[in-house]
Amino acid sequence: MPDPIAAMGPTWTLAGPKLISEGITHRQMSRLLKDAAREAEKMVAKNLARNTFSGRVTAAQLKAAIAGIGPMSTELWTGVGKITTAGMHQAGAMAADQALDLDLMMGVPGQGILQYAHAIHYDAAQAVEDVISRRTSGHTLAERIYAHGKVSTKKVGDIVERNLVLQRSAKDIAREVRDHFHPGVPGGTSFAAMRVGRSEINNAHHDTTRRLGAKKPWVLGMKWNLSGSHPRPDECNDYAEHSEGMGKGVWSDPPGKPHPMCFCYLTHFTEDPQAFMNNLATGQYDGYLEDLGVTC
């Protein structure tokens, strides 16, 4: 069943006034958000200068991201007291929605307007979650494949995180990191760059789903959904067949991605609707909801 509390926003709380996780502090995240916003401003100008429809749409996407980043960056920098999930998420989402310039959609036929409007949606809380996941997942970039070792891996890591904040595509990441690879990297620099882009995005989303699901008391497990893009059976097929008595592919503690460019994904396996409503009514979720700043 769909997550019954999803409408309340991502379920992340910040532990204390200074530390988001062991991987990143409030102020480090705030600086990253501000750096991403400054970079996005430059990209907006470049895309508007192209004077094409696609350029204007990209500019609108970036404007929504900049607007959504603002409230969260300020909250994280001040870091005073307990920062509630719902309030921060709503502030970022509202700012991003207000930044959507529907004038840019004129001339798109039929339902295309709605499709473009949906594509421009920006979720600042999800972007922050993905960066936290990247910092805490244990995934590392292999220094040997980069042109300048540690220097390049640091620059590539910064590029990846900035693009995760802006929720940009694997192609966007690949375009920026390509020049940092060693010319002799297996498969060539273009392939290696795209592999980094796809892997980093999918790893972040995977780890965010796993990390947030583990905190929700109504999530009983997580289902490994097999991508259809595998050229041959591999570990992912075994993960999708795994059983602990909750159904095929449902894990109590799912593994990480077994290989680069894995497009498999996790979904939360939750209480059935009646059990959820009973537990909610009897206060079994009260402690968790109070930690989020949510009152029922």
Image (cartoon, helix red, strand yellow):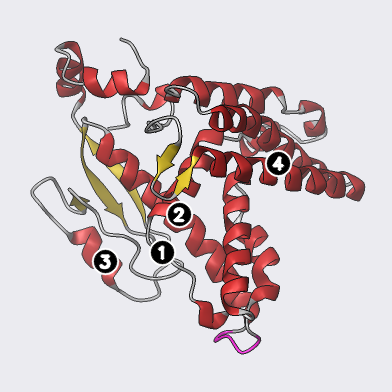
User: Earlier along the polypeptide chain: callout 1 or callout 2?
Assistant: 2
Q: CA distance from mark 1 to mark 2?
A: 7 Å
The residue nearer to you, when weighing 293 against 96, is 293
Horizontal and vertical percent position of residue 192: 57, 76
Residue labelled with disc 4: 37
Question: Could you tell me which secondary element the residue under label 3 belongs to?
Answer: helix
The residue positioned 86% from the left and 44% from the top of the image is 45
User: Earlier along the polypeptide chain: callout 4 or callout 3?
Assistant: 4
Horizontal and vertical percent position of residue 190: 64, 76
Quarter where residue 120 is shown: top right
User: Earlier along the polypeptide chain: callout 3 or callout 1?
Assistant: 1
Q: Is residue 112 visible?
A: no
Residue labelled with disc 1: 139
Question: Could you tell me which secondary element the residue under label 2 belongs to?
Answer: helix
Query: Comparing marks 3 and 1, which lies closer to the viewer?
Result: 1
User: Earlier along the polypeptide chain: callout 2 or callout 3?
Assistant: 2
Task: Give the magenta part as a residue range.
Answer: 183-187
Horizontal and vertical percent position of residue 296: 30, 10
Relative height, residue 104 to residue 266 (above, below): above
Q: CA distance from mark 2 to mark 4?
A: 19 Å
Do tag 4 and tag 3 residues touch (Cβ < 8 Å)? no
